[in-house]
Amino acid sequence: MENYEVLPPSPGKHNMDNYDEYCKNFTWDIVEKEFSWYTTGKVNIAYEAIDRMVDEKGKGATPAIQYYDGKNETVVTFAELKAQSNKFANVLAKLGITKGERVFLFIPRSPEMLISFAGIVKAGCIAGPLFEAFMEEAVKDRLNDSAAVAIVTIAGQKNRIKKDEIPSLKHVIVIGDDEANLAPYEISYEKAMAEASDVFEPVWLAKDDPMFLLYTSGSTGKPKGVLHTHEIMTGMYHTMRISQDVKDGDVFWCTADPGWITGVSYSVWGPWLVGIPTIIVGGRFTPDNWYHALEKYGVTNWYSAPTAFRMLAAAGEDAPKNYNLKLRHITSVGEPLNPEVIMWALKAFNVRVHETFFMTETGVNMICCYPSEPIRVGSMFKAIPGVECAITDEDGKVLPPLQMGNLSLKKGWPGMMKAIWNNPEKFNEYFANEPWFISGDQAYMDEDGYVWFQGRNDDVIKTAGERVGPFEVESKLIEHPAVLESGVIGKPDEIRGNIIKAFIVLAPGYTWSEELGEELKKYVKTGLAAHAAPREIEVVDKLPKTRSGKIMRRVLKAQDAGLPVGDLSTLEDD
Ligand code: 6R9
């Protein structure tokens, strides 16, 4: 057991002050009772998160969206969000789009992104949020895999949607375009919204009807569509209370983009479900912009990521002193939280940073530290009440304390993915050791049940908190005529956690140059997505491979770190 520092609980009152008792008495029923469907049987998250806030909870005039682009601010109240999302649901209905059909969102962070998301879900359709940095191939793959019928986008991004290559796609709804520029299949968002009625009865569903489909990367193959249901609202509500510690009067800001799971659960739906506004800060990240947003809104509860904290720390410990901040609870997700970040936050804000662990597949926070409990620096604490965590071996056997193994969660919590779109084999892989959901992460538990994260079990890369599959980057690189073969790894980086590094074998007739390197980076950036582009490229004569020809990325990683790689003359089996 390593040495670790212990930080005492945060001062003040917290939702989990009676941790032991709360855990002892917890059943999901306690959370479910908060929703109207518990008695009516009529389910739609958009009703619980929006309409009900207006109709039953007197929150019509409360802001639901506070959008700030660094200069201008837009506020959308719950009453306006109800009306606007009704309009958008009517736009879809008029197009003949019905329950269960896939409608994608390809919009930078903005009120329109959230309004259309809400409208899609209210209409009983499945929303497909896409990160705005995706380029045409990434967009095409996701729309084709899910047979999407419509997509909402902005004028500046519509050229990345190649409708001719997406047979299922019938409609492209464009925000901010001149009507003269619209193709016959394109619809002006503004015009359609102006013409639509603001009255719409939510399409009533069952708890396990699909709500959204979010594509995420694995270590092999193209990104997989993780399907979530309306039941995720129970997990969102629960974790907004216990993990994010949100109480009446709190101001909560989750900095994640709604194109990723943290954004969907905590920048969009989580705040609405507990009746508070979501704060959306548009534009580019700069320390000044973020500190300014924290001050402007008087943020008390802040959810962000280690890379962002490290970037802020790099701007200087004293930088926050220029701002009048009200922070009292900070949470972090997406990558390991290094002790330096926790120490920086203690100095800069006099607030601890609390780990939260979850995945696209788990939907909501699974393991987290609470403000009412001491922090063992480096540990993620324990699974939330209602979820059981264990460290298991290859056969699903639960391992004793201090043994490293698979971080596993007992299946069946509200918010767990329902399916991998069109890919039951992949879905079943997660549950090969029933009743455990296998995360793909490695961890151990100490004697007191605290979970200590140790890293991924596969080749998935976390760069600046974003999940990138090496296969996608490798595939893109070998499409370039200069690249014969490629192997892609995450290389440890002080700020970003990892950066993407590509090893390439050049095609005959090509020689390496700085220009070629730049060209290849740009090639991935414009073909796939900016965040997936390699920051480093190294030319090698050949790549280490298994007997069946699979690239051994673990060997590349070890070589790159200057670690022993074992005897490479012995080829490995898969
Ligand atoms: C929410 C999100 C999931 C993977 C996960 C793990 C890593 C998430 C973490 C963490 C260390 C934490 N991860 N939280 N690693 N400490 N607190 O990031 O979802 O993009 O699907 O990634 O992120 O490796 O398996 P997603």
Image: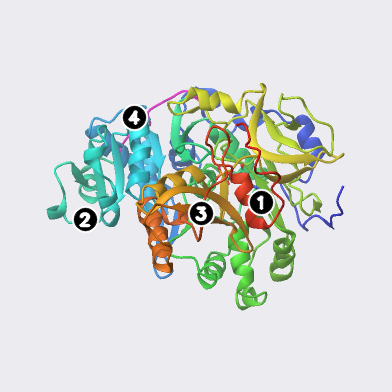
Q: Give the residue pinned by disc 2.
A: 177
Q: Earlier in the sequence, mark 3 or mark 2?
A: 2
Note whether ligand 1 is within 8 Å of mark 4. no
Does label 1 or label 4 sit earlier along the sequence? Answer: 4
Which of the 4 quarters of the picture holds residue 108? bottom left
Q: Earlier in the sequence, mark 1 or mark 2?
A: 2
**Inter-mark Cα distance, 4 to 2:** 25 Å
- Give left or right: position of 33 versus 390: left
Identify the mark nearer the N-term, 4 or 2: 4
- Residue at (49, 36) in percent of width and height: 48
Verify CB contact (< 8 Å) between mark 3 and mark 2.
no
Disc marking residue 502: 3
- Other residues around mark 2 within 10 Å, as few (<14) / some (14–19) / many (≥20): some
Q: Amino acid at mark 3?
A: Ala
Residue at 15% in and 54% down: 181
Q: Earlier in the sequence, mark 3 or mark 4?
A: 4
Which residue position is annotated with label 4?
101
Badge 1 element: helix
Crowdedness near tag 3: few (<14), some (14–19) or many (≥20) residues, C-alpha within 10 Å = many
> x%, y% of residue 447?
87, 39
